[in-house]
Structures are given as C-alpha cells and as structure tokens.
C-alpha cells in the first residue's frame, strides 16, 4: 500500500514536466527574430527580446539583421524567420496587398504579438551645413537608411509628396551617419525609437542639428498615412536638441504568422511583459512596451491567439478588428 502511494506521488511529480514537454512538442528548436540594420533601435531592441526568450521561455533565440520592417514582413510570411519587428505602416500595406517588396500579395497570415514602442520620423544634419528643416533638403544628398526600412520607405515618398527634390541614398543607418560626419552626405533621415544610438554617436563627432516635420508638412501628409500619429520628440532627447521637435510617428509591433504554436506565442508575450525591465535595460524605448498600449498601438492587425489569451487573462479589452476569426465570440 505504502509502495503504491509512493509510486502515485512520484508519477504526480513527473506529470507537470511531462505535460510541459508535450505542450512544447511543436515548438521550433530556435527562434529567429528579424530586426534591422546596425545602429537602429530595432537591432538593439531585438537583442533584448532574444535574451528574454532564451532566458525565460526556454528556447534558444537569436537576431538576424535585415533591411527592416518591410523585409521582416516578407521573411515572416515565408517562414524564413519566426518573429519580426515592424512598424504599422508597412504592416497595413502588407495586409492590403500593397507591400513594396511583394506587391499584390495580401499578408492575411501575419499576427501581432505585442506593442514595442512608437517610432518618430526624424532627421539630422551637421550644423555647418545650414540645414535645419525638411524644405532645406531640396537639392541635397540624403541618407534614408536601408531600402525596405521604415525611414527608407516613407521619407522618400514624403519628400516627393512635399515637393522636395532630393537625391536619396540607401544603406545601413550607422554607415550613413558616419558618411554624414565625413561630409559625404548632407543629411540623414530615419524613423526609430528614441534615442537613436547612431544619432547619439553622431553628435559626439560634430555639432549636429536634429529636426522633424513642420505643422504644414504634417497636415499635407496626414491623409496619406492613416496609421501615423502626430508626435513630439522631447527636448534634450539628444544633447544637441534644446527644444521639442514636432513630427509624425508610427507604432512598432513584434509579430509572427498564424503558424506559430499557440503555446509558444503565449509564453513569449508573457515573458516580455513579466520581464519588461530587462528590455528597458537593453534600450530605453522599451519603457513603452506596456499592457496599456496593446490596444492603442494596433487597431487592425489580428493578434496571435496565444497573445489574445494572455491579454484576456490580464483583463485587456481588444478591438474586434484585432481578434483573430477563430477566437471571435
């Protein structure tokens, strides 16, 4: 009798581990996170997410440098990476079948995991150039970051819409800020979470001016970008920036596709929010990775069922548009 009881207790002790192992049977051996080029916020933030997954979810995670949000959508859609980081503009266009890198394909399989931070559009020039506004970029050679990145995609469009005729060059943000410091570029335009490491480094090399969009320019662009919001870059975000800068911004989200196991998506989202302070230690922009921003950041990309389960457990009300069809009540 005693032996039977001991046997039963021993089996009970084993069951949770066995059940957990069974729950992970369809998980990948590793999780690859698509970020962006070196020097941008996505590259740094993604390293923090990979660390959290590796340390708290129990599956090895790594980052892959990419051309940014647009390419990340292509890579996740085609199952070449597991998680991507994107801004809401490219995400919206992908779902509409209007993605620059894959026109005509509707990305109905993408699923949001969690909000990251808001990305303001901003520009930098050397003080000696006399450039201090978007209109001053006319006739200049501009570095807009990698092709397919948020900055590379939207600054080129917006300059055309605003009638600013500039020569646009694409490349890694860190390389382009170095070229700006060397005088090979007249300005660099980008979109990234604050503060941008490459911009912080730039102002240590030469006196720098930072700027965004005027109110008139914002009003001209607003109808073309319904997924963008007005934003103020606080004074002293950079040591060379004594005043607030007005501009437009887009939210960033981490996302996957509908084929990620529900339990893995749940554990990733849970680990991120329960260890958010580790993300903040990686990059200050992660202070906006909060449950209160889950609905505010995204009103059209369906959240993954695993993410929805976690948010419902936390009492978060989600808009109907972001509830996947299989979970709609």
Image: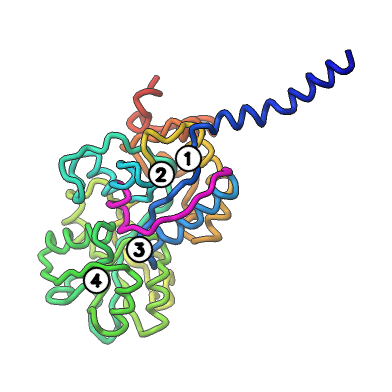
For the residues marked 2 and 3, what is the alpha-carbon distance in whole angstroms? Answer: 18 Å
For the residues marked 4 and 2, what is the alpha-carbon distance in whole angstroms? Answer: 30 Å
Above or below, 110 relative to 130: above
Which SS class for mark 1?
A: loop
The nearer-to-camera label among 2 and 1 is 1
Tell me the residue at 36%/85% (across/down). Answer: 206
Which SS class for mark 2?
A: loop
Residue 231 found in image quarter: bottom left
Query: How many C-alpha atoms fall within 10 Å of the one at disc 2: few (<14), some, or many (≥20)?
Result: many
Tell me the residue at 47%/53% (across/down). Answer: 62
Which SS class for mark 3?
A: loop
Residue beneath disc 4: 143
Position of the C terminus, as image quadrant, is top left
Residue beneath disc 3: 37
Residue beneath disc 2: 82
Residue beneath disc 1: 28
Query: How many C-alpha atoms fall within 10 Å of the one at disc 4: few (<14), some, or many (≥20)?
Result: many
Of callouts 2 and 1, the N-terminal one: 1
Magenta stretch in the rendered image: 57-73
């Amino acid at each position: 009798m005693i032996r039977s009881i001991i046997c039963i207790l021993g089996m009970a002790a084993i069951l949770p581990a066995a059940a957990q192992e069974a729950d992970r049977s369809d998980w990948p051996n590793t999780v690859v996170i698509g970020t962006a080029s070196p020097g941008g916020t996505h590259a740094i933030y993604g390293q923090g997410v990979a660390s959290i997954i590796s340390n708290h979810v129990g599956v090895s995670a790594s980052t892959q440098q990419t051309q940014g949000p647009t390419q990340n959508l292509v890579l996740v859609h085609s199952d070449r990476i597991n998680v991507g980081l994107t801004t809401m503009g490219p995400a919206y266009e992908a779902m509409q079948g209007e993605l620059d890198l894959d026109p005509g394909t509707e990305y109905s399989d993408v699923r949001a995991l969690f909000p990251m931070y808001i990305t303001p559009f901003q520009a930098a020039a050397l003080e000696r150039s006399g450039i201090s506004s978007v209109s001053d970029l006319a006739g200049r050679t501009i570095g807009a970051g990698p092709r397919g990145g948020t900055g590379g995609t939207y600054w080129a469009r917006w300059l055309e819409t605003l009638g600013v005729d500039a020569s646009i060059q694409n490349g890694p943000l860190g390389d382009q800020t170095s070229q700006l410091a060397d005088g090979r570029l007249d300005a660099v335009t980008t979109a990234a979470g604050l503060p941008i490491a490459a911009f912080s480094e730039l102002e240590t090399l030469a006196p720098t001016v930072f700027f965004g969009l005027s109110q008139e320019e914002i009003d001209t662009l607003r109808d073309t970008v319904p997924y963008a919001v007005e934003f103020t870059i606080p004074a002293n975000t950079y040591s060379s920036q004594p005043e607030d800068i007005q501009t437009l911004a887009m939210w960033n989200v981490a996302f996957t596709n509908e084929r990620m196991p529900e339990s893995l998506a749940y554990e990733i989202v849970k680990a991120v929010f329960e260890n958010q302070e580790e993300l903040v230690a990686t990059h200050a922009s992660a202070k906006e990775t909060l449950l209160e921003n889950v609905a505010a950041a995204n009103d059209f990309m369906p959240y993954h069922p695993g993410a929805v389960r976690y948010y419902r457990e936390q009492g978060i009300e989600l808009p109907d548009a972001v509830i996947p069809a299989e979970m709609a009540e």
